[in-house]
Structures are given as structure tokens and as C-alpha cells.
Amino acid sequence: MEIWDVIIAGGGSAGLAAALAAARAGARTLLIERQSKLGGMGTNALVHTFCGLYHPDTSRPWAWLNPGVPREIGECMMERTRQTAPDLMGRVYVLRQHPSLFACIADELCAAEPQLTRLSGAEWCGLKPRDNGWQIDLISCCTTQTHQTKSLIDTTGDATGARWLSDDLWIQADPAKLYRPAYVCGLPRVTGNHDENWRLTLGATIVRGIQEHSLPETAAGAAFRDSPFPEEMFVTIDLEAGQAQWDPLDPVKRAGIESVGRHTAMHLWSYLRKHHPDFQHCPPPNLPAHAGIRESARYIGDHTLTGEELEACVRNTDDVALAGWPMEKRENARGPKFRFFDRPEPAGIPAGCLQNARIPGLFFAGRNLSADHEALASVRVMGTCMATGQAAAHLALKHA
Ligand SMILES: Cc1cc2nc3c(=O)[nH]c(=O)nc-3n(C[C@H](O)[C@H](O)[C@H](O)COP(=O)(O)OP(=O)(O)OC[C@H]3O[C@@H](n4cnc5c(N)ncnc54)[C@H](O)[C@@H]3O)c2cc1C
């Protein structure tokens, strides 16, 4: 059994930031990830913009919101994509990111940390209290391993540890309200200028395809965005996913949305190749490793961040990170509904959202932190996940 100062389960944007922060502070750190790439939804589900990295006041020049790892990853991405500023989209700043570059940046940053050991293709599959800390079981290449730590950070996005420990430590929204899953794919060699008129024509082409029954109805949920590189676009297909029956923790339901997503993506590709001149040279789409899950289970911490607190830009004495992204609610496949903060100022995320006094030594960050369904619509974005991951590492180090 190996003993670590800090173990982080889940190598998405929150887990990556937590692992870097812990290792840089000198802690012997183990990062466990079931996929081969780090970056979570930002690599494996092809989510392609970093939101929440910048101060929410767009009447002023853009400025980083949270220091440390979120800023460092944002700067690396800007440098490699040759962007000198984020895009101003309506009332928010966003940074276009490339999932392949994000995976490489994550590799390089982790490889530079001698105190950090990273396991890929390793599934965290068990948790027990042990010696005032935790015993972690994982399975990799059909073999099991056991590790021990004083401090554990759960950044799996699914409140995995809480679901093993006790039903009163986690919560999940009503299936009909859960933010919808989506299937994202990359489309290279899309010509044209991609301006507003171009998008209107593209939308009309898709509607016609659905009306003529050449495209499945799920294609109505498709939204196109430019990659940071010329002639590459990403298409995000929001899925109703059976609305009232959707359960992101049910592998059968997940398999269902995977195949609907792929089916829709392939139909869109072949239809647009025939019916839209700017798609005629497009090779088959780059498919994600898995569909994108916006919301599943969350921890119940000492503090549950609410939509009202975010809206009122509440700051607390024990804030450990800042949230600046509006609440972007996606309860159906008809696009987002935004709830903006009252003022162009960030709100605080207190330490209590990342820990629970009943489970000392267990911390949580990213999209499974302690927040209500409304607040999650803001704090689930990758810039904020990085900030809460980094903050969870600092809390874990104090404990270790
Ligand atoms: C379709 C879609 C569009 C989005 N658009 C944007 C956007 O434009 N901008 C933005 O900033 N955010 C966006 N988001 C939100 C954002 O991508 C996620 O909320 C964010 O990436 C969550 O980060 P995380 O680290 O908390 O979790 P994840 O990225 O989900 O990472 C969790 C990691 O844990 C691993 N894991 C889980 N269980 C285990 C286990 N048992 N053992 C080992 N590893 C495990 C997973 O493989 C994964 O890598 C979008 C999300 C979706 C789905």
C-alpha cells in the first residue's frame, strides 16, 4: 500500500488544477484518471471554450479573475492558439480553447512536477476511512491497487466518494431539471466566413433537412462555434436525453445518449456535405471519447452556494475562489437561459463549499462542489472549476 500526502480522484479541469497546486506546494501527490487524457470534459467531451477565467466587468479591458493555475492554463492556451485576448461575446469574455492542446498542456504541466504521480486508465473504485485518513482502491488493466492518504480530493464530477459514504452527503437535481447532456464533435475544413448571415443560412439548411426528414429532429439542438484554428468548427448537439428519465449515473442511459449523439453528428455531416457548399470538403467529424455531461451528483458541504448569493455578488471572509460566469441554465435542448449577477462583479466561493466537517480529510471541487442547481449553472464552467480545484488543494494541504 503506497502512502500519499494528497490523492486526487478525477483529472478534469478541477483535478488537474488541484494536482498541480498540491504537488507544487511539496506534497506527495497522486492523480487518478480513468481516461487516457487529462482535462475531463475539456478534452474527452471536446468542450472548446474556457469560461469563468475573466473578471465579469466587460466595460473594462479583460482581466484574469483567479490567480495561479487557472491563469497559467489560460495563458498557455492563448500562447499556443496565438490569441492575444479573449472573445467578447455579448456580456461575457470567453477564451476559445483546443481540446488537443489542452491535453498536451496538462501533460506538460504534470510532467514538470516531480512530486506528482499521475495514473491514467485507472478507475477509482473504493473508499474506506483508515488511520485518520482514507484508503483508496482503484482498478487498472484488470488489477486492483490500494493507496492511502490523509487528504483526498474528489474531482470526479459525480460526487463519487459521497455516494459511497452516505446518502445524506450528496444531492442530484430532479431528472427533468438536470442540465442537458450534449454531444460535441469537431468538423475540419469548413470554409466560409462564419458570420451572422452565414449562421442564419446554416440554421435554415438544418431546419429544412429536419422538415424533409433527411435529418433527425435532434439536429435542431446543434450549435456551431469556431475553433481557435482556421476552417475548423465544433458542433455542440444539445440532447433532451429522455428529459424526465435522464440519469447521468445510469450507464444504460449514457450509452443511449452516446449513440443518439453519434447518429446525429454523422447525419449532420453527410447532409451538410451535400447541401451546404462550405461543408463539401469536410472529412468525417472528430468524435469525442464520450458525450458531455453538464450536471450529475453534487456534494453537500458545510456551505451550499446558492443562485441568490451569486446574483447578489456576495463575498465572505472565508472565500477561497471567485465565480464570475453568469448562471447559464440548460434545462432543455433549446439553448441556454442566462441569469446574470446584479452587478458586474464576481461572487465568492467559501471554503465550506469544498468540505464537510462530518468527513474530515475529504475535499471536493469542480462541478461536484456544494452548490444548488442554480449556482451550479455558473460554477461548473472550466475556469471556475480550475479555481476551486486549486483551492481544494490548499485546504487539503492544511489538513495533511
Ligand atoms: C456540452 C458541454 C458544454 C460546456 N460548455 C462549456 C464552455 O463552453 N465553457 C466552460 O468553461 N465550461 C463548459 N462546460 C462545463 C465544463 O466543461 C464542465 O463542467 C467542467 O469541465 C467540469 O470539470 P470537472 O473537472 O469538475 O469535471 P470533469 O471535466 O467532468 O472531470 C472529471 C474527471 O474525473 C474522471 N473520473 C470520473 N470518475 C472517475 C473514477 N471513478 N475514477 C477515475 N477517474 C474518474 C473523469 O474521467 C473526468 O476526467 C460544458 C459542459 C458540457 C457537458
Image: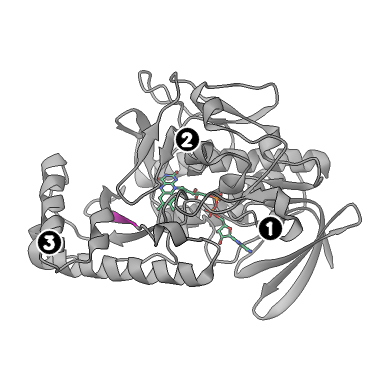
What residue sits 54% from the left and 49% below the top?
A: 173
Residue 237 among those drawn in magenta: yes
Give the Cα distance between marks 3 and 1.
Answer: 44 Å
Q: Secondary structure at mark 1?
A: helix
- Give the farthest residue toward the front: 244
Instruction: Check disc 3 and give the amino acid type.
Output: Gln
| N-terminal-most mark, 3 or 2 | 2
Please state which of the two labelled residues, at mark 3 or mark 2, is closer to the viewer.
Answer: 3
Instruction: Give percent across and percent down for residue 17.
Output: 60, 46
Residue at 61% of width from left, 66% of height from top? 120
Residue 176 screen position, x and y as percent: 44, 52
Label 3: state its secondary structure: helix
Left or right of 324 on screen, residue 136: right
Q: Earlier in the sequence, mark 3 or mark 1?
A: 1
Task: Kindly identify which numbered label has been placed on residue 211.
Answer: 3
Cβ of mark 1 under 8 Å from ligand 1: the answer is no
Q: Judge by depth and name the residue closer to the eye, 312 or 130.
A: 312
Contact flag, marks 3 and 1 (Cβ < 8 Å): no
Nearer-N-terminus badge (1/2):
2
Q: Which mark is residue 163?
A: 1
Q: Is residue 378 magenta?
A: no
